Image: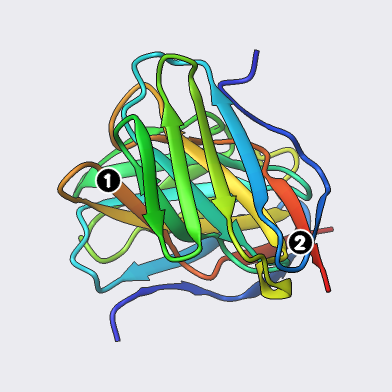
Amino acid sequence: DGGITQSPKYLFRKEGQNVTLSCEQNLNHDAMYWYRQDPGQGLRLIYYSQIVNDFQKGDIAEGYSVSREKKESFPLTVTSAQKNPTAFYLCASSIPGREGYEQYFGPGTRLTVT
Amino acid sequence: QKEVEQNSGPLSVPEGAIASLNCTYSDRGSQSFFWYRQYSGKSPELIMSIYSNGDKEDGRFTAQLNKASQYVSLLIRDSQPSDSATYLCAVTIGGAQKLVFGQGTRLTINP
């Protein structure tokens, strides 16, 4: 089955701890993205990567870090510097189509920091 | 002004009627427009993409794009209770691979 997997589905951490969220895709997509969604809000872009070993900051990158060592994997680390880390984190990937880039999402990881 | 704006709703529509969802965007250079459906607690699911002015139909869904007015809409015909969800409008702004999302419109279909 082709798709995007994120693990774990739910994650609980104490304040001050770093935590890494996993995102893997077997769709052979070049580009991958991390978004954050807060209750009742749209999605905000944290980081994105268009090719292996390269990534760019999105609109809210402060307190987050990423790596892209393999095409299939784009892990996100939420550091202790992120002031409000509790949120729904969504990973997406895309590939150029005939007319544009359609992004497809994984199931998400719900992070709670107390 | 927000880059992508949607009425947050809730929008309530009787079963079998047409649901109309609207979205405006700020960047005249935007080229790609998407509608995602998000059920409560789930991740967004792509339901429509549109790139040219006019209408694009896919089953009960029709996307409409008017670049001059910077306006994109989604019509859902013969609305079903299973269409009850939040609908997110997304637009490429500042680059073909970056999407900006509206806050979403919560739609409820009443049996």
- Image height of A30 relative to B25, above or below: below
Instruction: Name the one closer to the observer, B110 or A40.
Output: B110
Which colour scheme appears in the figure?
rainbow
Q: State the residue position of label 1.
A: A101
At mark 2, the secondary structure is strand
For residue A79, side relative to residue A40 (left or right): left
Quadrant assignment for the C terminus of chain B = bottom right
Q: Position of residue A93 (x, y in %)?
A: 33, 56
Observer-side mark, 2 or 1, equals 1
Q: Position of residue B105 (x, y in %)?
A: 71, 45
Residue at x 57%, y 64% (from the top left corner): B43
Q: Position of residue B29 (x, y in %)?
A: 34, 16
Where is residue B2, by image quadrant?
Answer: top right
Q: Amino acid at mark 2?
A: Thr
- Image height of A100 relative to A114, above or below: above
Instruction: Name the one closer to the observer, A62 or A9.
Output: A9
Residue at x 53%, y 57% (from the top left corner): A90
User: Which label was assigned to residue B62?
Assistant: none
- Image height of B55 relative to B39, above or below: above
Quadrant assignment for the N terminus of chain B = top right
Residue at x 23%, y 43% (from the top left corner): A50
Q: CA distance from mark 2 to mark 1?
A: 31 Å
For residue B59, side relative to residue B111 (left or right): left
- Image height of B98 relative to A106, above or below: above
At mark 1, the secondary structure is strand
Q: Amino acid at mark 1?
A: Tyr
Q: Is any part of residue A17 visible from this angle?
A: no
For residue B63, side relative to residue A11 (left or right): left
Q: State the residue position of label 2.
A: A112
Q: Is any part of residue B50 visible from this angle?
A: yes
Residue at x 31%, y 69% (from the top left corner): A25
Neighbor class of circle 2 (other Cα within 10 Å; few <14, some 14-19, many 20+) is some
